[in-house]
Amino acid sequence: MDELWRGFTQGIGLLVSLDPEVMEVAGRSLLISLSATIIASLVAVPLAAVIHLNSFPGKRAIITVTQALFSVPTVVVGLFVFVLFSSAGPLGGLNLIFTPTLMVIGQALLIAPLILGLAISALSGVDRAYVDTARSLGAGGLQVAGVILREARFAVVAAVIMGFGRAVSEVGLAIMIGGNIKGFTRVITTAISLETSKGELELAIALGIILLIIALVINIGLSRVQQRA
Amino acid sequence: MLKLENIGHFYGNRQVLKNINLEVARGELFGLIGPTGAGKTTLLRIIDLLETPASGVMYFDGAKVAATGRGRLDIRRRMAFVLQKPVVFNASVYDNIAVGLRWRRQSRSRISQTVEPLLEVTGLKALKDKNARTLSGGEAQRVAIARAVAVSPELLLLDEPTANLDPVSTLRIEEMIADIYRRYRTTIIMTTHDLAQGRRLAGRIGVLVNGEMVQAGKAEAVFSMPHNRQVAEFVGTENIVPGVVASREGELAVVDLGGTLIEAVSDYGVGGEVYALIRPEEVMLAKQRGTSSARNWLVGVITGVDMAAMPARVNVDCGFPLVALVTRASLEEMGLKPGQPVYAGFKATGVHIIERPG
Amino acid sequence: MKIISRLLPLMLTLVLVAALTGCDGFGALKPQERLRVATTTSLYDTGLWGYLEPMFEDEYGVELDVISAGTGIALEFGRRGDVDVITVHSKSRELEFVADGYGQERVPFAYNYFLIVGPADDPAGIAGLSPEEAFKKLAGGSGEFVSRGDDSGTHGKEKAIWETAGYDYETIRQAGQWYIEAARGMGPTLLMASEMQAYTLTDMGTFLSFQGDIDLVPIVDNGAILLNVYSVIVCSNGSNAEMAANLVVFLTSADIQELIGKYGVEEYGLALFTPSAGAEPES
């Protein structure tokens, strides 16, 4: 208890003094996870509109698989990306292993199914009449997609926020394909994991508090958005 | 303008449209009536190319419409469809009305030139900047119609434009449709389950029952001379009496309605099994037998009087039940009451004979 | 609706620009030369790599990426070519690595000793015994033992002791409740053993840096088998062999060897590592 309290007060101290190491790791975490979220959303959200608006054989199966991937363990995605991008792997030539770029790719792969699935259900919540109305007024495919995405925008934004939350809080993938390299691929979660294993709790607690604040902000944002949806 | 040939459609295993043949000329206001679930909405969706029919061919402006491809969007953009349940987009009234023009990549100034006068015509000017989501049902329906008219459609499709609206809003929408039809000479196809509305607005009417177009023609003709019992029932013909053609003389036939003989204009041969349709407003009631030889005069007993209806409805038993419509004034003058004997008279031309399938 | 049709392309552009400049911010797109080292956790958790890294970077103008992993994983990274250099501590596996052609040359650069640590009251009564004798006594069930169980160098050393003591390691793994596999790094394993008041095998460096946080003391610290040699190996499948060779030169240079020998003296009162100047130490 004593140790926890000491760690906590020192952690707060690191936060208040804007300790450069803490800020750097937190900033990198946000940058990597935001990039991953943006990339995943750019693919998943339009894809959700395409899947939602078209009927084709296997549509149901795609949605089921997508939903099953919501809870895929991060280490499984990490392993998959590692095998793919490791120097001995098929994409090893890109030389991306242990780089932030690959962490962005990995996190994007991790959360794309989540954003896709949630965006599809967000779009399913839009009355079919909107699609018909838009088409009847002469909207082309993209314009129809624009209409339903706009009508479901709060729920879609909620899906994107959920994706970001999963990306920023995962640790398995970040450590497997990022390598937790100080000043390069070290993010909040991998730093907490390392500092804890080294028994240096202050830094871990400071970073833990930042992660909690991020989670809190995400949840406040999410409930705001959901209230409007 | 529009021609449908043998259009058929299924939802799952259920056939919702059978062999629909229809031609609508440019500048016509065509009413599509029929009970709920008859396939009216499906037919409009097929015409607007929102759905591809399982069978049949559609011609738009003389050209055959392909089942797939980019060409469908171009044709769809020459039409507009107002759905039964008006959905307005989460945007201002102005932006809602302008949306179809924006999709057609029209310039800001051209859009304004189209939308501003439409706001006047539809009485929405004061609501221009309001979010359309906050409007009442009637106002939203006006926005939906204005939004459709804004794209200057060659063919305007209206699905039950006054369903679920209060009488005042209904009147307002009907006036608006009539006004738009007069002003822009747009070809309009509208569905309704309100017969009176169809009769008021449409020049020609098609009756859709169980997915089949059972009759199409001038509104008056459909109402006074339904082709068969289904149409007769749907258009509200109350006296549908089964009988057999007993004899004929020229175009005048004598029909035996279960022992009661009446004269009617018909070309069914002797022995033909028929229904005699006697329109209630064509039936006169009198205390004494009338003198005109052109009339059928039947003796009967009054079985009921409904004073609440306008005009009043009188039920007479003259071998078969017969409904007559009488003004309240003449009802009071004659003092007609249940149990009294009465003469019921109607012209031979007031009877419409239709086939009675065995 | 005008908002969506007008702003959507703009938003997409902004987002793309943000994503691209974001990538730039990582430094990944900059043509900065990088050298990747996978190291056994004990060299990282003791802070030695954190101490040496900036010196090497300054001297050679390169970004040194140090990835802390167990010896087993570090060797695997090396085999795959995901790193250019490894610093590990498992002689037999290192020799195999070099023999299989994955590594160029095994260069020992420092050593220390493993310790068997345990509760101060030594419930199994193994103090003063040789490591092999101590393990025999533990196998009799006289005390709990926490194993790294993660294929690390320390884990390899533990297996070697069991086998020298005459046991089949797989049998020991299944032997009973007293044998616990942590499957974690050295630090967490020490914390776990401390919580359970159990014995464990640890490298001296990690034990010293954790000493303040745990309630365990050295019980057995004498025996040839406890020698713990750290080597550096340039990986044949790596992508930066030239700079990797520089790292070997750096680690075995007189200046750095001296710094390694002094590392930890200030903090713990004794040295964590003994420099070996590229030669195999005599125990």
Image: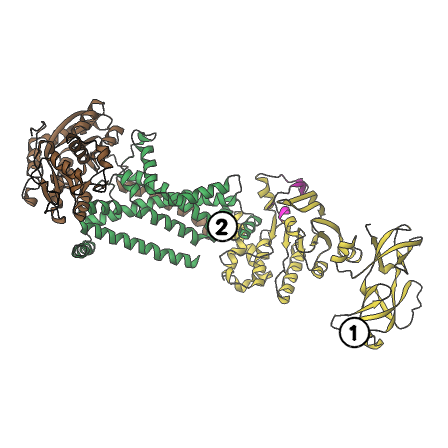
Q: Nearer the viewer, residue B69 or C192?
A: C192
Q: Is residue A172 magenta?
A: no
C99 lies above or below C128: above
Q: Which chain is yellow?
A: B
Q: Which residue is mark 1?
A: B328
Chain C colour as displayed: brown
Label 1 vs label 2, nearer the camera: 2
Residue B66 included in the magenta stretch of the image: yes
Between C146 and B194, the one nearer to me in the picture: C146
Q: Which residue is mark 2?
A: A124
Q: Is residue A78 visible?
A: yes
Q: Are marks 1 and 2 on the same chain?
A: no
- Between the residue at mark 1 and the residue at mark 2, the CA separation in whole angstroms equals 56 Å
Which residue type carries mark 2?
Ser
| Above or below, comparing residue C62 to residue B234 in the picture | above
* Residue at mark 2: chain: A
Would residue C106 appear left or right of B285 to someone viewing this image?
left
Label 1 CA crowd tier, 10 Å (few <14, some 14–19, many 20+): some
Q: Secondary structure at mark 1?
A: helix
Colour chain A appears in = green
